[in-house]
Image (tube, rainbow, N blue to C red):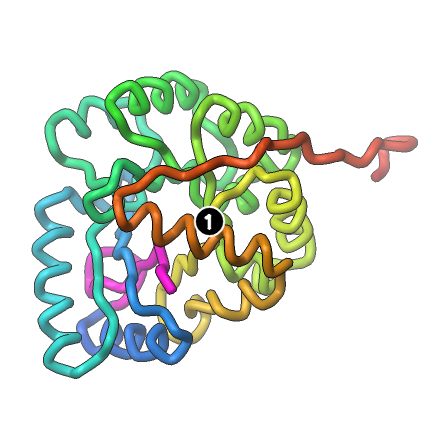
Amino acid sequence: MVDLHSHILPGLDDGAANIAESVEMAKQAEQEGIQMIVATPHHQNGQYENEKTAVEAAVLIMNQHLNDANIGVTIYAGQEVRMYGELVEDFEKNKLLPIGESTHMLIEFPSSGIPAFTEQVLFDIQLRGITPIIVHPERNMAISENPDKLYKLIKNGALSQITAASINGQFGKKIKQLSMQLIEANLTHFIASDAHNTTTRAFGLRQAYDAIDPSYAEYFKENAQIVLNGGYITKEQPYHVARKKKFLGLF
């Protein structure tokens, strides 16, 4: 299996604190059947800045440690890029990393909403040959309140990725329900771990795949491999998520 989103690199963000923790995460991933992991440390989220060269250097060191430990997992370079106004400019300055050497990039929104300039930035980055993958939309408040916000972005060319822990119920029933709705509406195209450690934010990727319809699971697995191989995703027709009507101010 391929995991497109993780925080396995040591000491770069709120993921693994040191190389020992990183190695333990890789061991856990291997036990789940994950052979390829994209390391995607936070970038420009207000707390962490991990530019391209720093991430690539850390990946080389990490892979050497895994090779020395005889762990059958390979790490690839990426970033979880927080949406910001200069995103396209920094991409042109070679500061940003697509997934591996693909034409896809993980894009994160603030948990509370979607910045007003998002549509323009996503349009501009696509003009430069990069397909944005919106990470964990099910955990975004604006999308939770109005899934059509995600629908519009998907129709405009973006993809999205749901977190395994959301499907596994670790973020609560509401987020699990929305995750399933987004899957059924063809509004998401990948499942990834967003793993930060081996305990509270572990991988759980196999569990998530086992929890959904096998046809969706196979589609998501294939998509992850296609992206890592530098290919392009065939999108299914997206649908609007049915929203519950309010009655006397209540749902």
The kind of secondary structure the magenta stretch mainly shows is loop
As for residue 79 lying within the magenta part, the answer is no
Looking at the image, residue 114 lies above or below residue 186? above
Q: Residue at x 28, y 50 (%)?
A: 228
Q: Nearer the viewer, residue 222 or 250?
A: 222
Q: Residue at x 38, y 63 (%)?
A: 195
Q: Position of residue 47 (x, y in %)?
A: 28, 45
Which class describes the residues within 10 Å of circle 1: few (<14), some (14-19), or many (20+)? many
In percent of width and height, residue 150 lies at 55, 31
Spot occupied by residue 183 in the image (x, y as percentages of width and height): 60, 46
Give coordinates of residue 190: x percent, y percent.
Answer: 46, 49
Amino acid tagged 1: Phe
Q: How many numbered callouts? A: 1
Residue placed furthest toward the right: 248
In which quarter of the view is residue 128 placed? top left
In terms of image quadrants, where is residue 129?
top left
| Residue occupying image coordinates x 38% and y 16% | 120
| Left or right: 101, with 235 as reference point | left
As drawn, 195 above or below 21: above
Query: Is residue 4 within the magenta segment?
Result: yes
Task: State left or right for residue 91 relative to residue 167.
Answer: left
Disc 1 is placed on an element classified as strand
Q: Which residues are magenta?
A: 1-16
